[in-house]
């Protein structure tokens, strides 16, 4: 062991570094009592070592490979260097995860992986070179610290003596037993609390990266421990059964005017931006149309927002739809009727994967992406392309045109002529932004929305010049909202606050009197409201989870909103995350409609069993 005291001394520093990072994670947790403190201590003792295991394994493999090397000192240096390098990678990944959790409230997960590996995903996060530079400098700083620690542990006699004292056989055995016991303790404790659906420790565990949840359901049942009754109404994830969408064959009477469709979707467009001051042109157009003032997106991010508006389905169907490359029935109807398509985005159709979902059946030559340069520059170029298409095809039969505007997306870019608000940050450093910056960031965002309005004005003007008012349906909608720390977060995709969910919706239908719809509406309702104008006689439930709110009979009493892997209930009085595991069942909180945490979660579940069961059934209705 004396030959490896230098490396063992660094291993001790590595363990301490992991513990410090874990402590930073725990600082983000809401402490409840001594139980959560003790649980966190057990987790820190064990997980600080578990995070070391890959690095120790790599160093061990290198040692085995070089075991017969004659130059023992060189071999030891190589093994030491490998451990230092792999330890740096481990801690850097933990720090990266810490930044994610602090800023957006989630760990590195399939969504983040998708962001980083899908074309266009990195840019979709609103990152620019100015944001990446501080990140690179931070990585270099951590690398420097680890290099210094590696050198110090190799040269410092003091550190080597400390390692020799700690790793004497008896003391090393005691340390190993303590780590093992702490690991077993937190696993069993977590399993019991999960079974009993007590949220305190489960919420503490949520902040831990790669925490290993344990289910003790069978064991505790066999021991006669009774589970809470609410366990019976846990929401289950959609199974991986074959997709059956639509549920039934759609009936169409063939009697429709084959309206042109201009569908305008605006990134991060929150509900309060549709007003005379910020967006006068869109506001003027909305006075000629149906305007929905209490409208909710089907998701808190682009993927689920756009998915829900075209399919009228909950976001949990995204995954089977993507696997099957099944397009929405709305576009199927237009394909049947021989429509010409022109779909353009200022982002990418590959991120999210709309080329394999929403527009899966649209030929690639009708899908255009322009994601080069600033967001407002893309929108300006793309609107010209859109208007040229509308003008060229105004007399050539029915067409469907779609444009996805990027201007209101972070970092909220706009040209000088759209500087509606003066007091705003000229650049955004996401590494240091805080709640105090919220109002100023919102003013910058308002300017980007004013630019969006300028581009929408061009589209509306083209419709009028081409005389399309009598045969063209116009849909104007946001994919989701945007928050500026009003409820503790910045942007979207992090929580289900009203700011992240509420978005404008305006639908212009020739011959339909303009008006305001103040009751609740959802992205899920858009296609059911349009369906009758395309000769559809089948009921909405055959192809959607939405309602035709224009039929004079239907009314929405609640909305369901999706993230990557969660469903969220928004009622007229309460909001709550619908539990998909016993962990989420125990940790979910009940909110009022203004996003304030309120008491009465158990009563809510018991009072709404039928509604929750309907959502459960609906979440699987289009699976075989």
Image: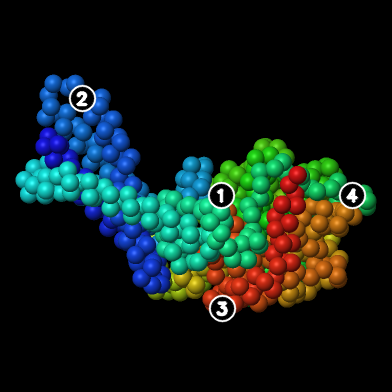
Residue 205 is tagged as: none
Q: Earlier in the sequence, mark 1 or mark 3?
A: 1
The residue that disc 1 covers is 347
Q: Report crowding for label 3: few under 14, some 14 to 19, many 20 or more residues within 10 A (C-alpha).
A: few
Residue 237 rendering spot, x and y as whole percentages: 63, 52
Q: Nearer the viewer, residue 194 or 330?
A: 194
Report how far apart the C-alphas of labels 1 and 4 lie in the structure: 35 Å
Q: Earlier in the sequence, mark 2 or mark 4?
A: 2
**Up-down: is 301 above or below 423?**
above
Q: Is residue 603 left or right of residue 610?
A: left
The residue that disc 4 covers is 251
Tags 2 and 1 touching, CB below 8 Å: no
Report how far apart the C-alphas of labels 2 and 3 lie in the structure: 63 Å
Q: Is residue 132 left or right of residue 576?
A: left
Secondary structure found at label 3: loop
Q: Quadrant of residue 190?
A: bottom left
Q: Earlier in the sequence, mark 1 or mark 4?
A: 4
Report how far apart the C-alphas of labels 2 and 4 lie in the structure: 74 Å
Residue 306 rendering spot, x and y as whole percentages: 65, 54
Report how far apart the C-alphas of labels 1 and 3 lie in the structure: 42 Å
The residue that disc 3 covers is 599
Residue 234 rendering spot, x and y as whole percentages: 63, 60
């Amino acid at each position: 062991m004396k030959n490896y005291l230098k490396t063992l001394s660094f291993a001790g520093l590595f363990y301490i570094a992991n513990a410090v990072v874990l402590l930073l994670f725990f600082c983000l947790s809401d402490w409840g009592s001594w139980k959560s403190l003790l649980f966190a201590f057990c987790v820190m003792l064990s997980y600080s070592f578990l995070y070391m295991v890959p690095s120790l394994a790599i160093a061990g493999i290198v040692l085995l490979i070089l075991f017969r090397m004659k130059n023992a000192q060189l071999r030891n240096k190589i093994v030491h260097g490998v451990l230092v390098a792999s330890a740096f990678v481990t801690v850097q990944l933990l720090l990266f995860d810490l930044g994610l959790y602090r800023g957006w409230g989630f760990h590195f997960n399939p969504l983040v992986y998708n962001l980083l590996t899908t074309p266009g995903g990195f840019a979709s996060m609103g990152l620019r070179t100015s944001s990446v530079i501080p990140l690179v400098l931070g990585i270099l700083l951590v690398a420097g610290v680890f290099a210094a620690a590696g050198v110090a542990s190799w040269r410092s006699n003091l550190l080597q003596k400390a390692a020799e004292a700690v790793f004497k056989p008896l003391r090393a055995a005691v340390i190993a037993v303590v780590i093992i016991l702490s690991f077993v303790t937190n696993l069993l404790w977590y399993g019991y609390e999960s079974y009993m659906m007590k949220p305190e420790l489960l919420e503490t565990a949520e902040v831990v990266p790669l925490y290993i949840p344990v289910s003790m359901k069978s064991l505790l049942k066999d021991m006669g421990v009774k589970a809470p009754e609410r366990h019976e109404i846990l929401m289950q994830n959609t199974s991986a059964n074959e997709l059956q969408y639509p549920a039934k064959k759609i009936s169409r009477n063939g009697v429709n005017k084959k309206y042109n469709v201009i569908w305008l979707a605006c990134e991060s467009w929150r509900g309060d931006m549709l007003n005379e001051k910020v967006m006068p042109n869109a506001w003027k157009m909305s006075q000629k149309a149906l305007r929905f003032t209490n409208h909710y997106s089907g998701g808190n991010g682009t993927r689920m927002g756009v998915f829900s508006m075209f399919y009228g389905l909950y976001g949990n169907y995204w995954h089977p739809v993507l696997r099957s490359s099944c397009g929405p029935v709305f576009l199927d109807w237009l394909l049947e009727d021989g429509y010409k398509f022109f779909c353009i985005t200022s982002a990418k159709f590959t991120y999210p994967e709309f080329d394999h979902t929403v527009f899966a059946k649209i030929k690639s030559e009708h899908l255009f992406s322009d994601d080069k340069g600033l967001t407002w520059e893309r929108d300006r170029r793309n609107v010209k392309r859109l208007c040229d298409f509308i003008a060229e095809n105004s007399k050539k039969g029915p067409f469907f045109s779609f444009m996805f505007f990027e201007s209101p997306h972070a970092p909220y870019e706009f040209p000088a002529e759209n500087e509606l608000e003066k007091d705003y940050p000229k650049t955004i450093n996401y590494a240091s932004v805080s709640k105090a910056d919220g109002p100023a960031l919102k003013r910058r965002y308002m300017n980007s929305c004013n630019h969006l309005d300028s581009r929408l004005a061009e589209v509306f003007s083209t419709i009028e010049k081409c005389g399309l008012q009598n045969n063209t349906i116009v849909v104007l909608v946001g994919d989701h909202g945007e928050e500026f720390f009003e409820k503790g977060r910045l942007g979207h995709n992090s929580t289900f606050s009203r700011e992240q969910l509420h978005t404008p919706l305006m639908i212009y239908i020739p011959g339909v009197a303009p008006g305001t719809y103040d009751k609740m509406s959802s992205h899920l309702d858009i296609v059911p409201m349009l369906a009758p104008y395309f000769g559809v006689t089948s009921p909405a439930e055959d192809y959607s989870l939405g309602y035709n709110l224009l039929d004079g009979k239907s009314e929405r009493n609640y909305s369901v909103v999706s993230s990557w892997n969660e469903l969220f209930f928004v009622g007229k009085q309460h909001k709550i995350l619908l539990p998909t595991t016993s962990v989420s069942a125990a940790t979910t909180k009940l909110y009022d409609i203004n996003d304030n945490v309120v008491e009465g979660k158990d009563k809510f579940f018991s009072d709404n069993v039928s509604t929750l069961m309907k959502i459960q059934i609906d979440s699987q209705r289009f699976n075989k």
